[in-house]
Amino acid sequence: MYRNTMNLSFENSKIKGKVVLTDSLDANPALLKDKTLYKFIWVVSGQLELDVDHQVVVLNAGQLLTLSHLHHLEFVRVDGSYFALMFNSNFYCIYGNDHEVSCNGLLFHGSSHVVVFDLSDQERRKIETLTGIMREEFESRDHLQDEMLRVLLKRFIILCTRVAENRQGVRKENGMQFETIRKFYVLVDTHFKEKKQVQEYADMLNKSPKTLANLLSTYQQPSAIRVIHNRVQAEAERLLLYTSKSSKEIALLLGFEDQATFSRFFKNATGLSTTGYRKKNKNQGEETQIDKLPTL
């Protein structure tokens, strides 16, 4: 089926900053392969079927997905219309500007668990209005374009942060509690290779492990040790799927004492050996490529 496509982009060559708004990411292999981009994807009509880190994700109209630069994304099926807003850290650093948008660890994290939101009609209208202004600004070729697009991107991120906090039941009176949880996720993303004990993260947060456990339970989050293990597992799976590194090399990269300890961890987490995991997903990938071949 023929589609009118929109591909708007801005790049600051001095700092290698990039921001992109497109309705045809599925048809742009170069953008899909860019491992520096954070992504917002939302469906306007119909349905999308995606493969995120070898997990099937189906998005329906009115749903929005956020992905970090670490997630591996493939489009399986496009039956409708959607938009993707993407940016790299050189254009807007969510770590350095955490005090502005508070999205790190909430919208973006390294776990393979993806974040999907059902947007209300009001939230959809706000996103449509904001992206409409962005589309106009992409066409403005002057010395203020860079900063204006950065301001609009920041507004978009804050809008999505508010959506996420609302879904988590965050209010003014309990905001500091949830902020502790968000910081915990950020710390795990930062230190999971060298720190694998709950006590270590509790100490960095100036909380007891019990207090941290109670906070996570209150907001229906996984246990602290599960969050840590999920992050380690996600990184191990990516290294197995998208690199040729050996199990021994991966064990070293992830901070395990030796290959045997890593192999036990991975088998307990996935039910498969590292070799079996690679073989299974390689076979599934080959079958998917066969399925995608055009029929005559």
Image (cartoon, rainbow, N blue to C red):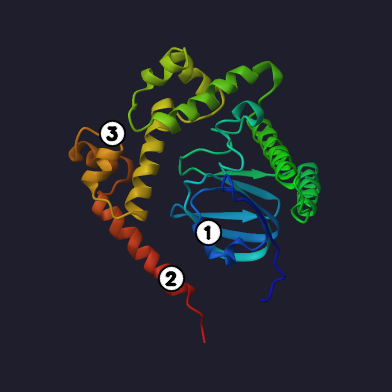
CA distance for labels 3 and 1: 30 Å
Residue 266 visible (yes or no): yes
161 to the left or right of 191: right
Mark 2 / mark 1, whichever is N-terminal: 1
In the image, what residue type sits under mark 3?
Gly
- The answer to which of 55 and 185 lies nearer the viewer is 185
Q: Nearest to the eye among marks 2 and 3: give it.
A: 3
Query: Can you identify the residue that label 2 sits on?
Result: 289
219 to the left or right of 226: right
**What crowding class fits label 2: few (fewer than 14 Cα within 10 Å), some (14-19), or many (20 or more)?**
few
In the image, what residue type sits under mark 1?
Leu
Image quadrant assignment for residue 231: top left
Which residue sits at x=61%, y=43%? 91
Percent position of residue 263, x then y: 23, 42
Q: Nearest to the eye among marks 2 and 1: give it.
A: 1
Q: Which mark is residue 32?
A: 1
Query: Can you identify the residue that label 3 sits on?
Result: 255
CA distance for labels 2 and 3: 34 Å
Q: Look at the numbered discs 2 and 1 and tell me whether their residues touch, using CB distance below 8 Å.
A: no
In the image, what residue type sits under mark 2?
Gln
Percent position of residue 83, x then y: 68, 56
Mark 2 / mark 3, whichever is N-terminal: 3
Q: Secondary structure at mark 2?
A: helix
Relative to residue 248, is residue 56 depicted above or below? below
Which residue sits at x=47%, y=31%? 222
Q: Secondary structure at mark 3?
A: loop
Relative to residue 207, is residue 150 depicted above or below? below
**What crowding class fits label 1: few (fewer than 14 Cα within 10 Å), some (14-19), or many (20 or more)?**
some
Relative to residue 177, is residue 130 depicted above or below? below
